[in-house]
Amino acid sequence: MKDPRQKKLAKIMVDYSTGVKKGDIVMLEYADGTPVEFIREIQTLCLERGARYVRIGYADSDLVYNFYRRADESQLAYFPRHELEFMKQVDVSIGIGSPLNNRTLAGIPGEVLSARQRLLRPIHERRVEHSRWVITRYPNHSQAQEAGMSFEDFEDFYFRACNIDWEREARRQEKLKRLLERSQTVRLLAPDTDLSFSIEGMGAIKCEGKRNLPDGEVFTAPVKNSAEGYIRYNTPSLYQGKIFRGIRFEVKKGRIVGATAEGGEEHLSGVLDTDRGARYFGEFSFGLNRAIREPMLSTLFDEKIAGSIHLTPGKAYGECDNGNRSAIHWDLVRIMRDGEIYLDGRLVQKEGKFVLPELKPLN
């Protein structure tokens, strides 16, 4: 029996998030933990909307691991130029990243994965900067286990977080967007965290179901060389197949000059040394999705936790471009229920709740 929630989500992704229309070339990619009936719903809608071509890409977790395990240096260094040439033709990119095993690549050295990220960066940037794209992580048993939930409960949670009225959500985010646009400085204050930076001239962007599902954040970017202080992230992160816990950064003139972690520290420098931009921040964001309250070791969900922020080492987005370039964009999350956030010296959020009257509807 078909789940009607699948059809609703597919419609959001095709009609609202990416606006598939007649003549579009669509790239639809999914991992081995995604049910085929969901992919079929998306494919059908794209064809009904008049897409000229829908390319289906499938990633098997074991085969991805096998590539990294068996490939020699020349194979790892091969750049698939045909993939870049195809990406130049793509109008819409839809990605469902739901691998059967979230930790398939845990045994692959971080420097190998980072080198591959650098190599494939032109393809990724072409997709992000020149197509109408959206990504999600469809529920499967692996994700439910990571979240400490039954599969049925996780599936219910997922659809509550994704199948909402995103146009109404966009209206709710508008006042925070405007406040960030006219603010100059940010200060984060919490246990083992006191970090300040400038956002002057960086602008702000609402995340309203157009790029991520679930969505729900408003982001900007620190002025590249402005961050000073220290921050301890209190949300674990699964990155490059490895789990990091209790990451702490010392920051001077925008650069991460000291980095420790309670778990995964042996891999931390490998990520931060991917390239020069990996030690500078490319994004600062408020998490706003009220359906997401606790971390579940999935960045796509955790960065949207209501009452959280993420401060991201790596590449800046073009919409709020501070000039930082990197092959990585590592959204690290701090839940601020034990802290305060100031804009231009004025308290705007305390213990994860907005205190300004105009922002209280976001709580």
Image (tube, rainbow, N blue to C red):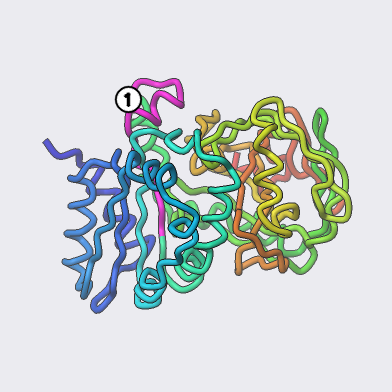
Q: Taking 223 as reference, is 112 left or right?
A: left
Quadrant housing residue 90? bottom left
Q: Residue 250, relative to residue 223: is it above or below?
A: above
The amino acid pointed to by label 1 is: Phe
Residue occupying the far left of the picture:
1
Name which residue lies at 73% across and 59% down: 276
Query: Residue 154: percent from the left, percent from the top?
Result: 37, 28
Quadrant of the snapshot with the C terminus: top right
Where residue 312 appears, as percent x and y from the top left, is 67, 49
Residue 354 place in picture, x, y as percent: 69, 40
48 within the magenta span:
no
Q: Which residues are magenta?
A: 134-152
Q: Secondary structure at mark 1?
A: helix
- Residue at the spot of label 1: 151
Q: Residue at x 62, y 32 (%)?
A: 244
Please indicate whether residue 21 sits to the left or right of residue 184 in the image.
Answer: left
**Above or below: residue 8 compared with residue 23:** above
Residue at figure coordinates x 66%, y 26% from the top left = 263
User: Was residue 141 drawn as part of the magenta stretch in this picture?
Assistant: yes
Instruction: Please identify the quadrant where the N terminus is shown.
Output: top left
344 or 66, nearer to the observer = 66
Asked if residue 41 is positioned above or below residue 14 in the image, the reply reads above
Q: How many marks?
A: 1
